[in-house]
Amino acid sequence: MRYFETRKARIEIIPMIDIMFFLLVFFIMVTLHMIPDAGIASRLPGSSTAQAMPKPQMTLAVDRAGMIHFQQRELSPAQLTTLLRSKPDASDLQVTLAGDKDVSLQSLMRVMDACRNAGVTHIGLAARAEGADPAQAR
C-alpha cells in the first residue's frame, strides 16, 4: 500500500546549478568577444631586439602625418596631455606608442613630450620582431 502514499515533492537544484554555471560561462565568453579591438592600421617597424611587454594600459598610434590616434579619436599633443592628466594616477600609467614605420622621430618625440608633461614615466615603443609577419602586427 506504499504505492498510494503521498510523497513530498522535491526540487532538484543540482541540475539547475549546472545550467546556471553554463549560462554564466557562455555570457562571459560572448561578452569578451563583443569588446572591440579597434585601432588604425599601421606598419610597425621591425627590431631584432623586440621583447614582449606587459599589456599596456593605454596604446597611442601615431600615423605618418604625426597625428595621434586614441580610441578612434585624433588628438593634438595638448589634448593628449590634458587626457593623461585626467587619469587618476598618471605616474603609474603605462603608455605604448605604436608609430608607423615611416613616422618621423620628431613626431614620436612630440608625443613622448606630451606624455612626460602629463607625468607619465612608463613609455614603450611598439615594434614587431624581425622576420615576423607584418599582417600580425596590425
Image (cartoon, rainbow, N blue to C red):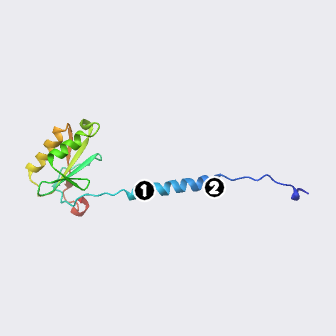
Inspect the image, locate mark 2, and give the three-letter code of the amino acid beneath it.
Pro
Q: Which residue is mark 2?
A: 15
Quadrant containing the C terminus is bottom left
Which numbered disc, 2 or 1, marks the residue that appears first in the sequence?
2
**Nearest to the observer: residue 81 or residue 40:** 81
| Mark 2 vs mark 1: in front | 1
Real-space Cα separation, disc 2 to disc 1, in angstroms = 24 Å
* 123 sits to left or right of 3: left
- Give residue 50's mark: none
Classify 56 as above or below 43. above
Residue 30 place in picture, x, y as percent: 44, 58
Classify 94 as above or below 63. above
Residue at the location (19% across, 59% down)? 42
Inspect the image, locate mark 1, and give the three-letter code of the amino acid beneath it.
Thr
Q: Secondary structure at mark 2?
A: helix
Q: Which residue is mark 1?
A: 31
Q: Secondary structure at mark 1?
A: helix
Residue 61 place in picture, x, y as percent: 20, 53
Residue at the location (81% across, 54% down)? 7
Using a 10 Å C-alpha cutoff, classify the residue at mark 1 as few (fewer than 14 neighbours), some (14 to 19) or many (20 or more). few
Residue at the location (25% across, 42% down)? 94
Quadrant containing the N terminus is bottom right
Residue 127 place in picture, x, y as percent: 19, 53
**Nearest to the observer: residue 122 or residue 50:** 122
Figure disc tally: 2
Using a 10 Å C-alpha cutoff, classify the residue at mark 2 as few (fewer than 14 neighbours), some (14 to 19) or many (20 or more). few
Label 2 close to label 1 by CB (< 8 Å): no
Task: Report the residue that reaches farthest toward the right.
Answer: 1
Residue 3 place in picture, x, y as percent: 87, 59
* 116 sits to left or right of 29: left
Residue at the location (56% across, 54% down)? 20
**Nearest to the observer: residue 69 or residue 43:** 69
